[in-house]
Image: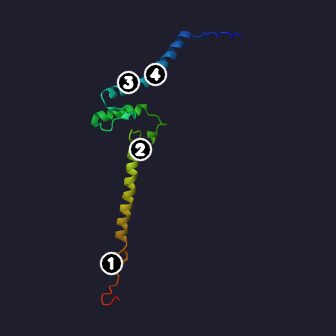
Amino acid sequence: MLAPRLKPSGVFPIARALSIASQRAASHSAKVNPFVEINKLAAEGKWDAINNCPKWSLTGEERERANAIYAKIITPEDNFYAYGGQPYGPYVYLVSRVALCFGIIFVGCKIYEFVVPEQYRLKIKYAPKHHAEEHH
């Protein structure tokens, strides 16, 4: 059994086809341009192909350019989105959390030393001495 062929729309079929083609071309070129730039960066050795992000060792204007291109290709579903969209965000996040933990412990110890008097903190140092007693 053969299905009947559908007739094309009679209202401005050429204009409709052109508008669809221009929409496809615009959306396609918007997604292609970052990858063309990424290919240029990779050819210059400024793109990490394994991790799909800019090289860690970039500095200055090169780093800004690479991060701008990287920001174009990430989406909110990316793992790096939670870390500000930076390529090495999870590592920076981990290091900052470990440093924060040690910092809180250090500040807590300093507050304890400042608030609690030395006689209470150092009970062994200020314990009564029994030098006159004989130890058998």
User: Mark 1 or mark 4, which has the lower sequence index?
Assistant: 4
Query: Please, what is the three-letter code of the amino acid marked with disc 2?
Result: Pro
Label 1: which residue?
125
Label 4: which residue?
28
In terms of image quadrants, where is residue 85? Answer: top left
Query: Please, what is the three-letter code of the amino acid marked with disc 3?
Result: Val
Cα distance in 3D space between marks 3 and 1 = 71 Å
What x and y, as percent, mark residue 114? 34, 69
Cα distance in 3D space between marks 1 and 4 = 76 Å
State whether residue 109 is above or below residue 91.
below
Cα distance in 3D space between marks 2 and 1 = 46 Å
Residue at the image position 34 percent from the left and 84 percent from the top: 128
What x and y, as percent, mark residue 71? 40, 34
Cα distance in 3D space between marks 4 and 2 = 31 Å
State whether residue 33 is above or below residue 51.
above
Task: Between residue 67 and residue 38, name the one nearer to us.
Answer: 38
User: Mark 3 or mark 1, which has the lower sequence index?
Assistant: 3
Residue at the image position 33 percent from the left and 25 percent from the top: 40
